[in-house]
Amino acid sequence: MIFLLAGTSDARELGLMLQQEGYDLVTSVVTENAGEVMKQHGLRVLVGRLDAKQLISVVSENEASIIVDATHPFAEEASKNAMAAASQLEIPYIRFERKSFEGQDSLITEVASYEEAAVLAANRGGVVMLTTGSKTLQVFAKHLLPLENVRMIARMLPRKDNMEKCEQLGVEQKNIVAIQGPFSKQLNQALYMQYSVTQVVTKESGKVGSVDEKVEAAKELGIPIIMIARPKIEYGNVYHSFEDIINTIKTMEVSV
């Protein structure tokens, strides 16, 4: 049995490939929406955020013999919990990591944290479009909302809890772009132009995370980009292709 920490489109594809290879697996996602997508594709799924202790319990209950971590590159806590659970249970841990964004440009400024990104955006001023989701919105709201020379545009998933968070933080409705991706370069450009964006804040989520489309759209319009680097985590067994993951599992002789 394989326990797959999922929640992204590439994680779902990996799960389907493992299933096609004949492996018995259970997937784990955080949101109900992600869970429904997994079910629609015929994958067994558990929904809910798990800490290390809960993960140990769930993996044990499902008699999984390996943990495959295919969570988002910025899901730092989930990966650390998975590594801790695998170590405690003395079973292998394998990390699938999206390939990093490749390409340097004078318009791109890389920073190490959300806080650093928010401070830089505040210093630059103008119209800032956030494409970093809702989880860290409070960091940007603290630095940007009080400034008269800054308009903060928050782009995020059209979920009730996201809208409630915006209301609590004081983000006005006219400054919310509630929309489900993926986004083409053309759509990104249309949004940048609609809001007269002067800088874009994004995360280095990888090509599958549509970073390329965000960046290329901004570059063509001459808009500066603040890119938040991935967390630096020592995963150990980390691979960047589905084939390498599957081949590694085969060498471990995981039962189907």
Image: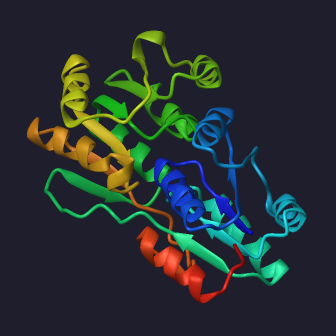
Residue 42 in the figure: left or right of residue 218:
right
Residue 54, picture quadrant: bottom right
Instruction: Note whether 27 is above or below 95 in the view shown.
Output: above
Q: Quadrant location of residue 64?
A: bottom right
Q: Is residue 158 above or below residue 232?
A: above
Q: Is residue 62 above or below residue 65?
A: above
Q: Residue at x 76, y 76 (%)?
A: 65
Most foreground residue, 163 or 115: 163
Q: Quadrant of the C terminus?
A: bottom right
Task: Residue 71: give x, y in percent of width and height.
Answer: 57, 57
Q: Residue furthest top?
A: 174
231 sits left or right of 91 in the view: left
- Nearer to us in this view, 21 or 119: 21
Q: Residue at (53%, 51%) from the top-left corner?
A: 12
Residue 157 position within the rendered picture, expressed as x and y whole percent measured from the top left: 50, 28
Can you say which quadrant of the picture contains the N terminus? bottom right
Across and down, in percent, residue 30 comes to: 68, 44
Picture layout, residue 113 above or below residue 32: below
Whether residue 139 sits left or right of residue 226 in the image: it is: right
Instruction: Give the residue at x 49% y 59%.
Output: 73
Asked whether the viewer can see residue 236, the reply is: no
The image position of residue 128, as x and y in percent, is 32, 31
Is residue 205 visible to the viewer in this orientation of the structure? Answer: yes
Q: Which residue is depicted at the point 46% across and 54% down?
A: 10
Q: How is the image coloured?
A: rainbow
